[in-house]
Structures are given as structure tokens and as C-alpha cells.
Amino acid sequence: MSGNSYEAAGVSIERGEKTVEMMKAAVEKTHDSNVLGASGGFAGLYALAGYKEPVLASTIDGVGTKVMVANALGRYSSLGHDIVNHCANDVLASGAKPHIFLDYIASSRLDPEAVAETVRGAAEACGKLGVALVGGETAEMPGVYSGGEFDIVGVCIGASERSAVVDGKNVRPGDAIVGLASSGLHTNGYTLARKVVEDAGLSLSDAPDGLGTTVGEAYIEPHRAYVGGVLALRSEVEVRGMAHITGGGLAGNLPRSLGGCGARLDASSWEEPPVFGFIRSFGRISEEEMRRVFNLGVGFCVVVAEGDVGKAVAILEDKGCPAWRVGTVTEEVGVSVE
């Protein structure tokens, strides 16, 4: 009679090793001379250079139940873009430039092809942003996850000069708020978005009128990165506040960047992707709830002086990011939408 084994208990060391081999080349393509040592160490080493008074900015996040959409479609590369771009935007909002990224993927049973596709997507996103993917981890945890369930988490670390940190302290009433276009749902609100599809008796392959594509294509659209546009903007314009618009929408995120001030927004000033109209209509969701859950077309905000609005919008659009003047900073605390 043979004894028990790790494999028999549900964890395969061989699957883990195969997964690592499948993604190794893509990961190493993101490395430059600042990355020290080869892949496979116990920690990723990065030589931080070029700063006089460096301040590190770090963030950790996941993509929520968007993993269930990717799993249903059998398309995982976009998840890698999602997690990198989401975390990089969070670091960016503090005034820092993202430098390194790490990922963690856990499942009931590793699917090497799916994990490798996800990490290759993350490596591609890192390459576009000039970020080094310096490490990661995979874990098989039968009993914690069921069936084909899995989760993905990312960590991003960036740096800035202490004098370049953006914390909202220079924001003043009368300043302009510029909104940068989102690509859709990004990585928030998917539990509600998926419920709308289920309750309406639709599938991800359906293409309702007005959506312009299938539900699956609209829901899998990657989270947009704002690093290139915002770094270019900051080289020419004083940016006094920045907010990454994630869970909680504009009302929940914008106040974090205003230094104690408030904001008055004009909801007609920006373009809303069709996916939000689909969710609003098919889910019969109130406007208040839509604003509380989703970004509604604005994925990032920057606060600039009133006189810099035109220049700011031009720079952002030149970098491929549609942008609009969406509101004004007010003395009254809170966010009002007109």
C-alpha cells in the first residue's frame, strides 16, 4: 500500500515548476540594469538610483471577481494588465513613479497555461510602463478555493523625491479638476455587474443593443494605465492633487486628493462608455448607486490651477488619454454632481 503524498493531497510541485518555466522569459524581459541577480531568488533586488531624498510609495490590490469573467471566457492575459495597471495607478496618485511589481496567484489547482498567460500579460503591462516584474508567487490551496476558482493580487512599489510627493496640500478652492477617461469597468463593481447579467437572463456572449460588443468583451476590457500621461503632464504643469477612481467612484475617491476641500462636478462634461448604460438599464440601478460603485468613465483625476486646464488636457490627449475639465474645487467639503 502506498503512503500519502503532497500530490495525492491536492498540491503538485511539478505543476508549480512547470508554471514558473512557462512565464520566466516574459518576466525577465521586464528587467533592466537596476534589477540585481537572476530570477528565482528569495526576494527581488532593485537598485534605486537617481533620487536625493527618495520616498517609497507602495500599494497592494487585487482585481476582485473580474477573475470569474476571465475564467468564464478562458482569457487571462487581460487580468495581468488589470493588476499591474491598477496598482501602478495607485502609486502614481501619490506622486511617485512605479518601479517594481510582484504578483501572487492562488487557486484550488494550478492551471499552468492560465497562470502563465496571466503573468505574461502582467509582464507585457510592466514593459509598457517601464516597471520591473521582480518576483511573484503561486499557491495551490485545495479546500480554500473550490473547483476552478483562483485569485490574483499585485504589489507595486514606486519612488519620488520628497519634494515631489502629491498629497493635496496645495489644492485651493477654484482649482480645476481634469478627468482622464476610463476604458470601462476597470477592476471594480464586478459583483454587481455580473449579477445584472445573471438577473437579466443574459450570457457573456450576448450583444445587447447599445453596447456595441458582447457583454464579455465589455466586461474583460483591461484597466487603463495613466502613468505615461501623468508623468508627462507633471513635467510641464503643476499638479496639485491626484486621485485614482476605483471602488467608491468619484465621490469616494476624489476627496482623498483635495486636502480638505470639496468638489463640484458636471456629469455632462465627460463621455461615459456604453457598458455603464447597459448596467444601469438592464439592472434598473439608481444613479446614486451607479455613482457610488462605478467610475462611470473617469478613471483618474488631476487637480491643476484654473489657468492650466487647456495645457493639461492637450498634454494628456497627446499621450493618448482623452481628458476633460470635469469640475471645480470648492471650499465646501464633499462632492456634488450636477
Image: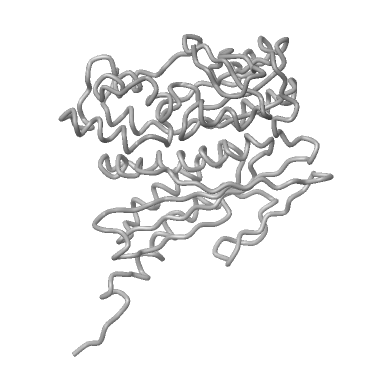
Residue at image point 31% right, 32% down: 193
- Identify the image quadrant of residue 207: top left
Hey, which residue is sitting farthest left in the picture?
Answer: 201
Residue in front for this viewpoint, 174 or 118: 174
Q: Position of residue 300 (x, y in %)?
A: 55, 27
Q: Position of residue 232 (x, y in %)?
A: 68, 25
Q: Is residue 217 left or right of residue 329?
A: left
Q: Position of residue 191 (x, y in %)?
A: 32, 38
Q: From the viewer's perspective, is residue 326 above or below residue 59?
A: above
Hey, which residue is sitting farthest bottom in the picture?
Answer: 1
Q: Is residue 132 left or right of residue 204?
A: right
Q: Quadrant of the N terminus?
A: bottom left
Q: Is residue 130 left or right of residue 202?
A: right
Q: From the viewer's perspective, is residue 39 above or below residue 271?
A: below
Residue at image point 61% right, 59% down: 44
Residue at image point 54% right, 31% down: 253
Residue in front for this viewpoint, 212 or 295: 295
Residue in front for this viewpoint, 100 or 334: 334
Q: Position of residue 71 (x, y in %)?
A: 29, 45
